[in-house]
């Protein structure tokens, strides 16, 4: 059987990705704006972006939990929120990179070759540093929120004692 | 070559139903195993629950992915949230969100049981409670989904 911590990583990563997307869908639909938003999105691109978010969230959650025994160690749980903040920022930048590749690829395919440099690549290079900073800030905030929610859910699961550090 | 959008949406709907069947059927299976255990089977049932948790989270991701794909098929024709259909959809989305949130402590509890089944006084009773709630939540979500499909 796979290690319990691998299951914890898989469950938390999927929890973060699905909850993030579901919360946005619920909010946008409650404002009656979901049909228009989804109608303008290519189905393959939409599915691909969700999978990309799932993958980047899994990879960054794995790094955030790397070496931490969330199940047995209270000390590990205490240090988790700080790691969630840091790796949330990395996740934000990683997902932006995926979005950027998709957006630039789509724009290049719809632009005449002579216009690609000045019309797409130069503006993209100018915008990229600012977009990375914003995506890191958003990712870190979302990471901190999820880190805090996770700590509450750890407590709800009865993970309040220390079975390793004092052994 | 362009893919027929009807074929794509049929494939998305198939995946959605298959993921729901896996998640709901798996929860009922673990509940049944925990409710009518054979002698000395607590470790076995916890092992089955551990495997189910891997499948549950894969199914949860696929359900979210394909659920949004199903909504995208409506496009601008998606009913407004103020309509009876829209209110039911909001209720379903809220129920799914709630189930995903409460599933994290369930997974953590099962992972803890797998580390040390003797630490719990009655692991099978714990599993019965956890999977009873999960199966009940799935039954409600399935009822809402059927209402949406035929409403």
Image (cartoon, rainbow, N blue to C red):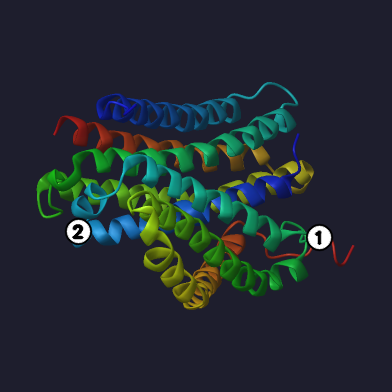
Chain that bears disc 2 = A
Identify which residue is drawn at 52% across, 29% down.
B26
Secondary structure state at the residue bearing disc 1: loop
Q: Position of residue B125 (x, y in %)?
A: 60, 39
Q: Position of residue A71 (x, y in %)?
A: 72, 56
Q: In this view of the protein, can residue B35 be seen by the observer? A: yes
* Image side of residue A19 versus residue B8, left or right: right
Per the image, the residue denoted by label 1 is: A163
Quarter of the rendering containing residue B38: top right
Q: Position of residue A80 (x, y in %)?
A: 67, 69
* Image side of residue B61 versus residue B85, left or right: right
Identify which residue is drawn at 52% across, 77% down.
A133
Q: In this view of the protein, can residue A12 be seen by the observer? A: no
Label 2 crowding class (10 Å Cα cut-off): few <14, some 14-19, many 20+?
some
Chain that bears disc 1 = A
Secondary structure state at the residue bearing disc 2: loop
The quarter of the rendered structure image containing the C terminus of chain B is top left
Nearest to N terminus: mark 2 or mark 1? 2
Q: Nearer the viewer, mark 2 or mark 1?
A: 2
Q: Position of residue B140 (x, y in %)?
A: 32, 39
Quarter of the rendering containing residue A104: bottom left
Identify which residue is drawn at 11% across, 46% down.
B84
| Of the pair A152 and A7, the residue shown nearer to us | A7
* Image side of residue B69 versus residue B65, left or right: left
What is the distance, in whole Å, between disc 2 and disc 1 at their CAs?
49 Å
Quarter of the rendering containing residue B13: top left
Per the image, the residue denoted by label 2 is: A33
């Amino acid at each position: 059987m796979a290690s319990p911590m691998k299951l914890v990583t898989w469950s938390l990563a999927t929890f973060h990705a699905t909850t993030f997307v579901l919360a946005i869908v619920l909010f946008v639909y409650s404002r009656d704006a979901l049909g228009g938003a989804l109608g303008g999105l290519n189905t393959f691109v939409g599915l691909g972006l969700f999978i990309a978010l799932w993958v980047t969230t899994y990879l960054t959650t794995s790094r955030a939990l790397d070496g931490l025994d969330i199940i047995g160690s209270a000390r590990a749980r205490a240090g988790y929120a700080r790691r969630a903040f840091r790796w949330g920022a990395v996740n934000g930048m990683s997902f932006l990179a995926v979005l950027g590749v998709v957006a630039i690829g789509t724009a290049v395919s719809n632009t005449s070759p002579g216009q690609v440099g000045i019309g797409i690549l130069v503006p993209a290079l100018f915008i990229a540093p600012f977009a990375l900073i914003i995506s890191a800030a958003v990712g870190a905030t979302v990471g901190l929120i999820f880190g805090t929610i996770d700590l509450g859910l750890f407590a709800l699961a009865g993970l309040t004692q220390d079975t390793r550090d004092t052994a | 070559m362009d893919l027929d959008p009807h074929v794509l949406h049929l494939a998305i709907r198939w995946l959605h139903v298959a993921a729901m069947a896996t998640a709901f059927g798996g929860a009922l299976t673990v509940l049944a195993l925990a409710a009518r255990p054979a002698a000395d089977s607590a470790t076995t049932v916890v092992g089955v629950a551990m495997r189910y948790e891997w499948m549950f989270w894969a199914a949860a991701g696929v359900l979210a992915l394909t659920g949004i794909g199903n909504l995208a098929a409506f496009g601008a024709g998606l009913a407004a949230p103020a309509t009876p259909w829209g209110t039911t959809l909001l209720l379903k989305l809220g129920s799914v969100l709630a189930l995903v949130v409460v599933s994290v402590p369930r997974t953590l509890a099962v992972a803890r049981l797998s580390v040390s089944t003797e630490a719990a006084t009655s692991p099978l009773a714990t599993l019965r409670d956890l999977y009873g709630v999960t199966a009940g939540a799935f039954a409600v979500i399935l009822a809402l989904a059927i209402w949406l499909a035929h409403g």
